[in-house]
Image (cartoon, coloured by chain):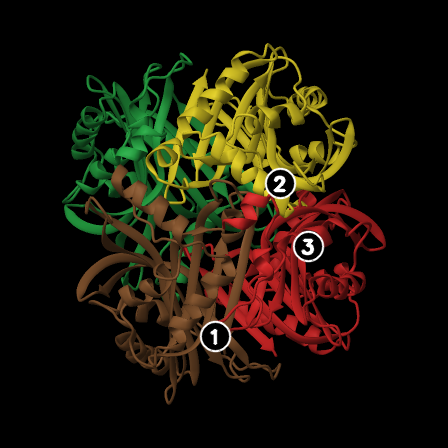
Chain colours: A red, B green, C yellow, D brown
Amino acid sequence: MGQTKKQGLIADTQSESDHRHLEIDQVGVKKIRYPLQLLVADQVQATVGLWSLAVGLPAIQKGTHMSRLIGWLDGLKGPIDSSLLSEKFKQMLTLLGASQGQVAVTFPFFLRKRAPVSLVESNLDYEAGWTIKGTQARVEIWAFIQVAVKSLCPCSKEISSYGAHNQRSHVRLNVELLNPVPWPELVRFAEDSASSEIWPLLKRADEKWITEHAYENPKFVEDLVRDVALRLNADRRVGRYEIEVENFESIHNHSAYARIERL
Amino acid sequence: MGQTKKQGLIADTQSESDHRHLEIDQVGVKKIRYPLQLLVADQVQATVGLWSLAVGLPAIQKGTHMSRLIGWLDGLKGPIDSSLLSEKFKQMLTLLGASQGQVAVTFPFFLRKRAPVSLVESNLDYEAGWTIKGTQARVEIWAFIQVAVKSLCPCSKEISSYGAHNQRSHVRLNVELLNPVPWPELVRFAEDSASSEIWPLLKRADEKWITEHAYENPKFVEDLVRDVALRLNADRRVGRYEIEVENFESIHNHSAYARIERL
Amino acid sequence: MGQTKKQGLIADTQSESDHRHLEIDQVGVKKIRYPLQLLVADQVQATVGLWSLAVGLPAIQKGTHMSRLIGWLDGLKGPIDSSLLSEKFKQMLTLLGASQGQVAVTFPFFLRKRAPVSLVESNLDYEAGWTIKGTQARVEIWAFIQVAVKSLCPCSKEISSYGAHNQRSHVRLNVELLNPVPWPELVRFAEDSASSEIWPLLKRADEKWITEHAYENPKFVEDLVRDVALRLNADRRVGRYEIEVENFESIHNHSAYARIERL
Amino acid sequence: MGQTKKQGLIADTQSESDHRHLEIDQVGVKKIRYPLQLLVADQVQATVGLWSLAVGLPAIQKGTHMSRLIGWLDGLKGPIDSSLLSEKFKQMLTLLGASQGQVAVTFPFFLRKRAPVSLVESNLDYEAGWTIKGTQARVEIWAFIQVAVKSLCPCSKEISSYGAHNQRSHVRLNVELLNPVPWPELVRFAEDSASSEIWPLLKRADEKWITEHAYENPKFVEDLVRDVALRLNADRRVGRYEIEVENFESIHNHSAYARIERL
């Protein structure tokens, strides 16, 4: 302290050198909410992102300049897709003077869905996000999506004289994009693999349809994760991936869970 | 500052007088976790409580002495039930010199359950709690419990050629105890009102039973909340109450919800 | 079952009569996310709402028609403020044939803020919402807002030779609007009462300012809640209210908490 | 269906063969709460665990037998430490006929702490857990702990005429145990690296001590993560590790974050 304060100059503590000889893998800001313009099916959708922004810090440097990360985030104007975000990511590395870094964001978005029989329309919400990481020379882009669906238990159907237990399930995909995959296609990987997809607005004719359709398509959590994997395996735009399915079992107070990864 | 610091004495800022002429309804501590010895069905069960402790503050007083609240909490030795806690509550008021206050705690506990056909045993978890509030002269005791059950939709069963959508539901009771009601009885109010109760450990014969049993007992969220209300209305130990039922609908990504209160 | 299914007609189970003689206070849907166009400071801000929609159900009726609630929500086009929402609320009651009901929604929104010294701009997020309840004849409108601020402990400052513990705090207002109060004004009630307001983007000169400013304005959780109450008491647009302040204490792993209500 | 149901026999759908040629990395149960007897500093502490239990599934098998996982969990009697749990883990693999698997559990526990000046005692909570994974031949044991501490900003102290912003921080360690490390020692890695450790119960003399002590030990999030890393690097019982520090910044509504991993 002392001198600096007395003269009214403002010291730059972060830029001092460090003597612990320890690189930091990631340093930055976390859990910052910011408005986000998203491109979904060629339309701009305004939503709210929850961001983490981090860079690597060389062993010799005491601290990073976190306010620059917020400045970079504030500069993200206009609709964003994964390609644009990976371009901006490189600018973030330059701005921070960092050799590597990571940007992660999650946000809800909506698709307009039509009920299967009545055709009434409503908006279903999906939780989604991107992780962008790497260096100026090599950037990885991963897309995340969580899709709520319906699963109906094949064992319960098989052994019971009538009925079958069923429940809401979450399918979570985290896929490396070798080429862009539109959000509605990522959604279909999950919805087409379930006992049934779901809708916010259903009339009675639709409720009959979804009840019977799910009964005709029983799926274990194991079936669901495998059917999603088959679809991802057949798509050349997809690189590495993680698939998780979680059934909020209606006969238990815990979840059934399955995971396939190709890493 | 000045004098106090120089002399090394420690000022008592909270005890100063306040000039805003505003009583505070509740002031204290929140979200403090502490070990808890609970009496469940005459057995001591060790669990972890999440506590809020608050007292009223007269207009003339600047602040309360929060450390005394923690001291009181630390002194809660031995197994606790609602009667003991309301005795201790009065001691808390005395300790803080407060005319009124409120203690709220939530905690998980377990009941040993036997599957309906195989009779295999396992522990089902319940989220529960107490709210104790009032004055030295008059103390109210409320018990809270959240019970996970299964609900099966009567409409879906009625209109569909086969199957019926069903899901996990939460029944939440918050009841004023005029006389003590053991936890297992509070649980039964909820479990007996559902399409079926649930278990952590089920063999295939049990799964068949629960599937068919739920199909034979379809319940709307409205049925569930009414059937719980009927049971509470018939019990003289219960004073005022709030009942909430939330179905995590398996055909939607939102909940169906119903609430009856007697306040 | 039987006849209905065989003929392919679709029964209306919800419309059947009920024999338990129990009114239901609230029945509807909960935790549904939907896009929301919000008016903030005369500008439209797109965000995401988390909704609960419920109506009262007479003792004689078996169930409500939940799909109509979603239909009503889907019909909320264009920018919404509290006056418009209370008009729409009456239409919801009509649509459901209900004598009373309740709509609650929470959502994040952003204000553009300028740092105190450098004047750099960034967006700060606030969690907000409305509760609309009542009948065709009488509608109550409540506005909710949670504002993150900085609090610095007067006792710690007074008794310590240097420094003072400080922390992030949440000020939560839930106010009945007798007349509309713009969001930025609700924010000011909270920010002006704190040791300091906060910003996402701060340069070093701003960090010096906020550190010193908070040190010059120490506030107990009791001071904060009282200073907000004074401001609300002086505002004729505000009816009943609840104020909560929670300090995420930096010297503890629990919160300090205070609450004043005028109900 | 058909035959099985008519004869009242109960089919074993999970044991059927699968034709998708896809191994599943993990299949099992998640988010199951169960009572847990924990060994902390040679004393048994009763707490509540939140468990995930999973095994790998060969490509040829349709489903796993999830009820056996719950049966295994129910059989975990008596106090558990990491060594015992890894023995039990091998029995789980045998029970499921699995070549590999993973058990993860988190739970709160408490340490009795004495305030720095007054020496009053109280219990501080820590969130902790284990991950056990591998095969019969090779089992990895990881211990997780989250420790709440106080951090004070060196830059804010340096540039300000008085005061310095400070806040609660979370230090999260996830370490591979080559040899057992007692919980209190894992806690010390974090608490000794912070601007100050924290306590539930502090008298005014303690509050003065912690305020001044933190002011004398300013730490960036970068300093904290590095100081923990230095301690882990010096301990031969620790294999691979991940260290995360998150500061709940009192001048922002977001967190500062740093991470060092040795994987």
Q: Position of residue C74 (x, y in %)?
A: 73, 36
Instruction: Determine the residue located farthest toward the bottom in the rendered image.
Output: D137
Tell me which amino acid carries mark 2: Trp
Asked if residue A156 can be seen in this view, the reply is no
Badge 2 element: loop
Above or below for B185 versus D154: above
Chain ID, mark 1: D
Q: Nearer the viewer, mark 1 or mark 2?
A: 2
Q: CA distance from mark 3 to mark 2?
A: 14 Å
Chain ID, mark 3: A
Residue in the foreground of this view, choosing between B126 and C156: C156
Tell me which amino acid carries mark 1: Gln
The residue singled out by tag 2 in the image is C199
The residue singled out by tag 1 in the image is D14
Badge 1 element: helix
Q: Position of residue B110 (x, y in %)?
A: 28, 52
Above or below for D140 versus D43: below
Q: Residues within 10 Å of mark 2 (few under 14, many from 20)?
A: many
Q: Going by the image, does A246 lie left or right of B78?
A: right
Cβ atoms at labels 1 and 3 below 8 Å apart: no
- The quadrant of the rendering that contains the N terminus of chain B is top left
Quadrant position of residue D106? bottom left
Q: Going by the image, does D183 lie left or right of A189?
A: left
Q: Position of residue D149 (x, y in %)?
A: 39, 53
- The quadrant of the rendering that contains the C terminus of chain B is top left
Cβ atoms at labels 1 and 2 below 8 Å apart: no
Badge 3 element: helix
Q: Which residue is rendered at x = 53% and y = 43% of the image?
A: D160
The residue singled out by tag 3 in the image is A68
Q: Nearer the viewer, mark 1 or mark 3?
A: 3
Q: Position of residue C105 (x, y in %)?
A: 61, 33
Residue in the foreground of this view, choosing between A244 and B138: B138
